[in-house]
Image: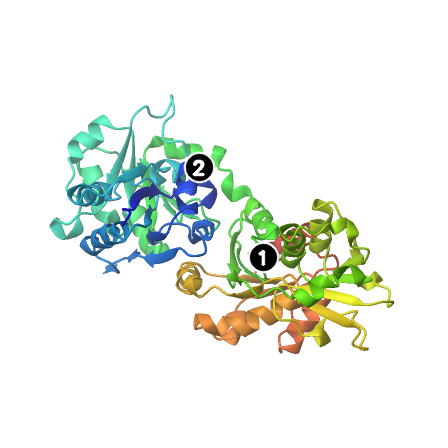
Amino acid sequence: MKQGKVYLVGAGPGDEGLITVKGLAAIQKADVILYDRLINPKLLESAPSHCELIYCGKFPKQHLLKQEIINEILIDKAMQGYNVIRLKGGDPGVFGRVGEEAEALVEQEIPYEIVPGISSGVAVPLYAGIPVTHREYGISFALVSAHDKSNEGKPDIDWSGLVSSVDTVAFYMGVSNISYIADNLILHGKPKETPVILIQWGTYGRQKTLQATIGDIAEKVKETGIQNPAITLVGGIVSLRDKLKWFENKPLYGRQILLARTGTARSTLAAQLKEQGADVIEFPKWTKKDVPSNDKVLNQLFTYKRILFTSPECTNEFIDLLINRNMDIRNVRADLYCLSKKSLKVLKERGLTGRLAAEMNLCGPLLIVGNRSLNVKKIPYIESDGNHDILQTSETILDKSFIPVVGHMLRETTLDTIIFPSSSSVDAFMKSVGYYGIEPDNLIKKLTIVCMGKSSGQKINAYGYTPDSVLSEPNAFELAKALTQEKVLESLK
């Protein structure tokens, strides 16, 4: 049997855009991924559909998988011939136990590679507006673990050396020991007025900061309740933050959004919201399942006068299907129609033109193309005379392997908004939310409901909920404007 290989990969500090090109390439060819709590779960969407996902996350005072078991899984999966990824937050060589895992692989003669990542101790302060070195504030910098196995978890540190020789110190996971850290820094010569900042969930839209001095930071942590994961940065360089902070100035910074999802493709809308500072969870997570080709429909394809595409995904799949069967799309004489502007965009990108379904004429045989089981009665603009056929290009089903992944995401965030881009997204959400162990009522009633158009507003009304905002135009600009206004209103309460 062919022996597999293990890649020990740093996922970066949180923002999924901060993974390295090499790290992403490793994920894209993985058969098995063992991932930690602090990696961004969105990175797992880049893995192949067959990839096995194993959660190794550690919560405070709760270890899901012990290190020895993780080592055994890495070895076992590699010996079965798989490409195995150990995906770790930040850089695997900085408090990531990569040395222990590599040693275990060496002992079993398992081939491996270590792929460095961007360290949280450097990136997180930058997202708070603080470089870790500056010619006027500090030319030395140290990364320090704020907990260990000895002294009841209190870090065993050369405090005198640290205070006397290092200008700026980043403590990893130091919240529970913040009083111990501050007391020892002061005891060994750091002035009480030395600036300090705690940065929780750094580089995510839910990033929070707490500024103080080492003299009063412990009391402020008690008052605010800030928790790990957090980087604690100590040094005069923290004073640069007021001038240089940039991430928190984004218009949707702090918004935590659930975006109802109907297809397998990543949403451009989600990317646009994230670019403006929001955290976005696309929900539910879908995957594709092949369906048998409808040869009868394909054999008479060129006889249809009208073709209606019900989703962007099926539009692409239809064109690919013709190409794979060596069928010349130029022979399709039908007028092409789409239920959404996104599907029209796909047609244009593939060199074809079409119109929205609202403009569809009622003459001639109609072919309806979809990537899920279709209830024709629920498709708008379809006449009831039955003069139509259906071609299903694939089956879109719930990706059950991602149910635990989405569960972790929901636990780690405090949602404030849910967005329904279409009426079908409302149905998809309502029908699948139970698979995640969630009662729709318990979730939706806590959130601001934003509908991208009248149809989604009417649909959510039919389920008994009143939207807080229904956009006049279903585009990202109008959505951002509505969310920004909502944020202002919240700040005034």
Residue 347, position in %: x, y?
Answer: 72, 50
Amino acid tagged 1: Leu
* Amino acid marked by disc 2: Val
Of label 2 and label 1, which has the lower sequence position?
Answer: 2
| Residue 336 pos. (x, y %) | 78, 57
* Residue 443 seen in the current view: yes
Q: Is residue 51 left or right of residue 255?
A: left
**Is disc 2 surrounded by few (<14), some (14 to 19) or many (20+) residues within 10 Å?**
few
Q: Residue furthest left?
A: 151
- Cα separation, mark 2 vs mark 1, equals 42 Å
**Residue located 21% across and 31% down the image:** 163
- On screen, residue 17 versus residue 449, left or right, reads left
Residue assigned mark 1: 492
Please name whichever residue, 469 or 474, is drawn nearer the observer in this view of the structure.
474
Mark 2 secondary-structure assignment: helix
Tell me the mark number nearer the camera, choosing from 2 and 1. Answer: 2
Q: What residue appears at the point 24 percent right and 34 percent down from the top-left corner? A: 190
Judging by the rendered image, the residue that carries numbered circle 2 is 21
* Mark number displayed over residue 432: none
For label 1, the crowd category at 10 Å Cα-Cα, with few meaning under 14, some 14 to 19 and many 20 or more, is few
